[in-house]
Each structure stands twice: as structure tokens, then as C-alpha cells.
Image: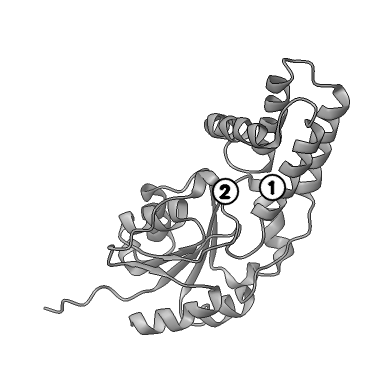
């Protein structure tokens, strides 16, 4: 009986900050938020309060721009003791709407890597966040035709990957998940039995950071998506 692992047949890709820019726009908006509240709180303290609100609200609002916008409003009310001017609330809402309409900027090597791998593997987009916003970004990215399936989920857990890779492949043992978040894209995928490939991004949200599972047999790290086809070829 062969001791070789099952052959790879399905590759899952994260979207935000793996295939296109995302965190950059959150940071830009947060900087504007700090300017709006400069008279009430120092930027570092405001960032801490905002992050705490985001963490607290994930269970109610989920991930994405709408939850971020509501957390900014909540934080503004808190740091001003309820005295935040209506114009500031309006500016926060405008900033959120601007984020929801920002042009999509694909990352280097995304299109050519997807095109190359789609010839030999099932390609699945596995992303979390607001349904309408993720659908918008996928449509504007020009990458949609490379995917055999798209899964927009509320969160990424071990059970998520087990379910997705059974639904759209031959199970987690025959799958690989590629993304910039160790916490959401790599660790739970490896726990499900898949390969987990980390593609670091310069900006990573604090709540997505985690330690790399360097001793895990199915963990790999690459510098950019252009290195992925050669990595997969070396695993065959």
C-alpha cells in the first residue's frame, strides 16, 4: 500500500490582500477617522478603542466595511461621551460609502497564477466579509472566470474548509488553501487536513495575526503568488 498523500486536486484562494488590495483602504479610512476625532483622543488611543469595538462587534456585524463603519461610529460616540457632532457622523458614513465603491486593485501575479493553475486544478474562491461588497470586488477584479466556485462565508474555521473542500473537491486532504492570513487562511485549513500556503501582505489587520505553524508538515510560505505554481509542482 502506497504511503503517498492524496493528490492535490483543489486550490482555494483568499481574496482580500491575497488577490487584491484591501487593508490599505481600511488604514487610509482609519487615518481620516483619527483626523475627525483629533480634538477628543490621541490617534494611538483612538486606534485601540476602534480595534476593541471591531473585536466586540464581529459577532453582530461580521467582517467587512459595514461593520467597520458602525464600529467607527460607536467609537466616536464613546470617546466624545456622546457629544460627537452630527457632521462627524456624516463624514464617517461618507468614508464607509467611499470604501464600498473604491476601485479594485489586483495584486501582482494574481491573474497569471490563477490562469495557469486553472488548467489543472479546481480553483475555489473562499472569502469572508460582506456579501455584496465581495461580489462587487470579484466582478470588478476580472478574475471571476478562473474560479470553478465561489464561497463567501461569515468566518473561516476548520469546519468551513472541511465543508467547502468536500462540496467543491475531493475533500480537505486533496486541497490547498492560499492566503495572507495565518489565522483565517492557513491554520484552520491545515487543521482540516489541507495544505496551507501563507502569502504575506505588507499590511495585516491585528485580528488576523497569528504565529506561523512552522512544524506543520503541510505548511508552506511564499513571497508572492508568482511562486505558487513552482511550489505546487515541487509537491507533486
Residue annotated with mark 2: 205
Q: Quadrant of residue 9?
A: bottom left
Pick whichever of labels 2 and 1 is earlier in the sequence: 1
Q: CA distance from mark 2 to mark 1?
A: 9 Å
x%, y% of residue 49? Answer: 61, 30
Q: Decide: marks 2, 1 in contact (CB < 8 A)?
A: yes
Q: Residues within 10 Å of mark 1 (few under 14, many from 20)?
A: some
Q: How is the image coloured?
A: one colour
Per the image, label 2 sits on a secondary structure element best described as: loop
- The answer to whether 97 appears left or right of 173 in the picture is right
Question: What residue occupies the far left of the structure in this picture?
Answer: 1
Per the image, label 1 sits on a secondary structure element best described as: helix
x%, y% of residue 45? Answer: 64, 32
Measuring 52% from the left and 43% from the top, which residue is drawn there? 154
Q: Which mark is on residue 60? A: none
Q: Is residue 198 above or below residue 236?
A: above
- The answer to whether 162 appears left or right of 13 in the picture is left
Q: Is residue 114 above or below residue 177?
A: below
Q: Where is the C terminus found, in terms of image quarters? A: bottom left
x%, y% of residue 123? Answer: 50, 69
- The answer to whether 85 appears left or right of 131 in the picture is right
x%, y% of residue 206? Answer: 54, 45
Q: Is residue 34 above or below residue 135?
A: above
Q: Residues within 10 Å of mark 2 (few under 14, many from 20)?
A: few
Residue annotated with mark 1: 26
Q: Quadrant of residue 141?
A: bottom right
Q: Where is the N terminus found, in terms of image quarters? A: bottom left
Measuring 30% from the left and 60% from the top, which residue is drawn there? 193
Amino acid at each position: 500500500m502506497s504511503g503517498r498523500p492524496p493528490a492535490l486536486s483543489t486550490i482555494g484562494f483568499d481574496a482580500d490582500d491575497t488577490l487584491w488590495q484591501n487593508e490599505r483602504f481600511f488604514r487610509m479610512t482609519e487615518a481620516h477617522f483619527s483626523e475627525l476625532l483629533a480634538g477628543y483622543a490621541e490617534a494611538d488611543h483612538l486606534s485601540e478603542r476602534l480595534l476593541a469595538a471591531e473585536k466586540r462587534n464581529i459577532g453582530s456585524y461580521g467582517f467587512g466595511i459595514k461593520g467597520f463603519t458602525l464600529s467607527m461610529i460607536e467609537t466616536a460616540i464613546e470617546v466624545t461621551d456622546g457629544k460627537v457632532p452630527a457632521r462627524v457622523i456624516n463624514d464617517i458614513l461618507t468614508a464607509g460609502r467611499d470604501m464600498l465603491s473604491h476601485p479594485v486593485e489586483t495584486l501582482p501575479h494574481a491573474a497569471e497564477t490563477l490562469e495557469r493553475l486553472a488548467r489543472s486544478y479546481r480553483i475555489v474562491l473562499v472569502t469572508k466579509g460582506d456579501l455584496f461588497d465581495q461580489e462587487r470586488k470579484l466582478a470588478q477584479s476580472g478574475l471571476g472566470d478562473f474560479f470553478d466556485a465561489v464561497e463567501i462565508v461569515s468566518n473561516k474555521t476548520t469546519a468551513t474548509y472541511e465543508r467547502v473542500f468536500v462540496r467543491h473537491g475531493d475533500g480537505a486532504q486533496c486541497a490547498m488553501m492560499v492566503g495572507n492570513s495565518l489565522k483565517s487562511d492557513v491554520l484552520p485549513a491545515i487543521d482540516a487536513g489541507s495544505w496551507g500556503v501563507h502569502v504575506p501582505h505588507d499590511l495585516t489587520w491585528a485580528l488576523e495575526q497569528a504565529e506561523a505553524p512552522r512544524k506543520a508538515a503541510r505548511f508552506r510560505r511564499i513571497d508572492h503568488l508568482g511562486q505558487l505554481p513552482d511550489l505546487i509542482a515541487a509537491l507533486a
